[in-house]
Image (spheres, grey):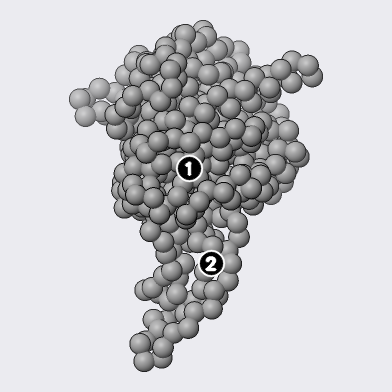
Amino acid sequence: MTEQGVRLQDRRIALGITGSIAAYKAVDLLRLLQAEGADVRVLMTASATEFIGTLTLETLSRHPVDSDVLALQADGRIGHISTAHDVEAIVVAPATAHWLGAMANGLASDSITAACLATSVPVIVAPAMDGGMYAHPATQANVARLREFGYHLVEPEFGPLASGMVGQGRLASLDRIVDATVRALGGAPAAVAGAPTGAVSQSGAPGNSASAGSSRTDLAGRHVVVTAGGTAEPIDPVRFVGNRSSGKMGIAIAEEALDRGAAVTLILGNHTVEPPAGAHVAHAETAAEMEAALRALTPPSGPRFDVLVMTAAVADFRPHSPSAKKVSRSSGMTLEMVATPDLLAATAERVRTSIGASGARRPVLVGFAAETGSLERAEEKLRSKGVDLLVANDVTEPGSGFGTDTNKVTIYSSDGSSEELPLMAKREVAEFLLDRVAVRLAAIVGESAALAETN
Ligand SMILES: Cc1cc2nc3c(=O)[nH]c(=O)nc-3n(C[C@H](O)[C@H](O)[C@H](O)COP(=O)(O)O)c2cc1C
């Protein structure tokens, strides 16, 4: 994983994406490079555009994507030549077997090989493919040739592959690719407290610092997942059982995390405010969809995030048998409800199991509990759900809870402490909370570094 701080501040980097099934991971890689302060422009092979759309990459990078070696830029310049001269490093991830072969032989039939041939800046290459393809002598010879060019190879990892088989071919972890890029550029500029975070969305005013000494970049290089909004459990195709959640609290946390340099995934149910432009948004309407999104982020190989904050108001019950057709008034309606799974407890459990099996670093888990009348159940919830922090509020208090721009919360911690905060703007609550999260994360990173040294 990356160290804390911004290590690629204002560095101009080209990200080359080729036609591998791992191309979807390049979107997160782009966000991580940006979170390190880099200005990233994207080059793609024609095959890569079959795997992921240029619109996503143009939106996130804020540059046109160069996916046609024969197309001129709007100003008449030749794309790959101007890239070759403008950038300070080219990162090719994922790199296909085909691309390695083309590059090893100097065949400039796509924008990435053409730019690499025309440049003298460091080139970082992260191959991804089936294990057999990677082991083939032709591929190995091409990899060796690229090393002779002085390229920085980030070896693929051993593990389950898209084919269903197991082998060495999985794209290296994105942290390893970012680290290799930092190294290829000769190390890191020192992290600047309070510095802006490059191309990462800067949504909203940060407000007063919630605690003295909190750095504005203390989540740089981290992946923060936030669930927000309310679920809607279908009764029939037009009606649902829902709740009053606006999504404001979770969205404020997503904005704050982006401002601190994190890559943010927002798993979003029904909401009344716009999510921040810089977040990756996964829409999840029902408890089941939210569960599926969380499952995808907590595979047996370990959680794919550093921080999970679950603010979403997930239905505790759903209609047992939603009707496929609109129920007419004349037929009347009696709803039989069934309990939905407890997503917070289940996700925390899945995280524990996966880190136990994989040795992955544990993330910081934060739950939210909306109570009515008193917070006396909160400490028990913290323990039973197995989270690091539980943020509880009494939604019946004025200015606190659903739909409001303010909140009055108490933060319970697994170390036994609790902090009762005054009524404040949701964005300020987010700032306070992420201060506490950043401290926990730094402790966890320190623990794993110490463990790695002793092993
Ligand atoms: C679904 C699918 C997944 C693929 N994944 C990979 C892959 O991970 N690595 C690889 O080397 N080739 C992969 N291929 C084959 C490449 O897409 C193919 O060789 C293509 O010509 C590569 O073009 P490019 O190197 O110009 O991007 C895949 C093909 C398909 C249909």
Return the residue found at the far bottom.
330
| Residue at 29% over, 32% down | 204
Query: Which residue matches tag 2?
Result: 317
Residue 42 image point, x, y percent: 39, 30
Return the residue found at the far right.
455
Label 1–label 2 contact, CB within 8 A: no
Amino acid on which disc 1 is placed: Val
Q: Judge from the rendering whether residue 9 lies leftward or rightward of residue 446; answer left or right.
A: left
Asked if 343 appears above or below 81 in the picture, the reply is: below
What kind of element bears circle 2?
strand
Q: How far apart, in angstroms, are the residues tagged by discs 1 and 2? A: 22 Å
| Residue at 70% over, 42% down | 352
**Foreground pick, 101 / 281:** 281
| Residue at 68% over, 33% down | 360
The part of the image, by quadrant, that contains residue 114 is top left
Asked if 305 appears above or below 290 in the picture, the reply is: above
**Foreground pick, 243 / 377:** 377
Q: Residues within 10 Å of mark 1 (few under 14, many from 20)?
A: many
Q: How many marks?
A: 2
Residue 359 image point, x, y percent: 73, 33
Residue 53 image point, x, y percent: 39, 44
What kind of element bears circle 1?
strand
Q: Going from the N terminus, do you reach mark 1 or mark 2 first?
A: 1
Q: Judge from the rendering whether residue 340 lies leftward or rightward of residue 263; answer left or right.
A: right
**Foreground pick, 17 / 118:** 17
Tag on residue 226?
Answer: 1
Determine whether the beta carbon of the residue marked 2 sits less than 8 angstroms from the nearest atom of ligand 1.
no
Asked if 186 appears above or below 165 in the picture, the reply is: above
**Foreground pick, 198 / 13:** 198
Amino acid on which disc 2 is placed: Phe
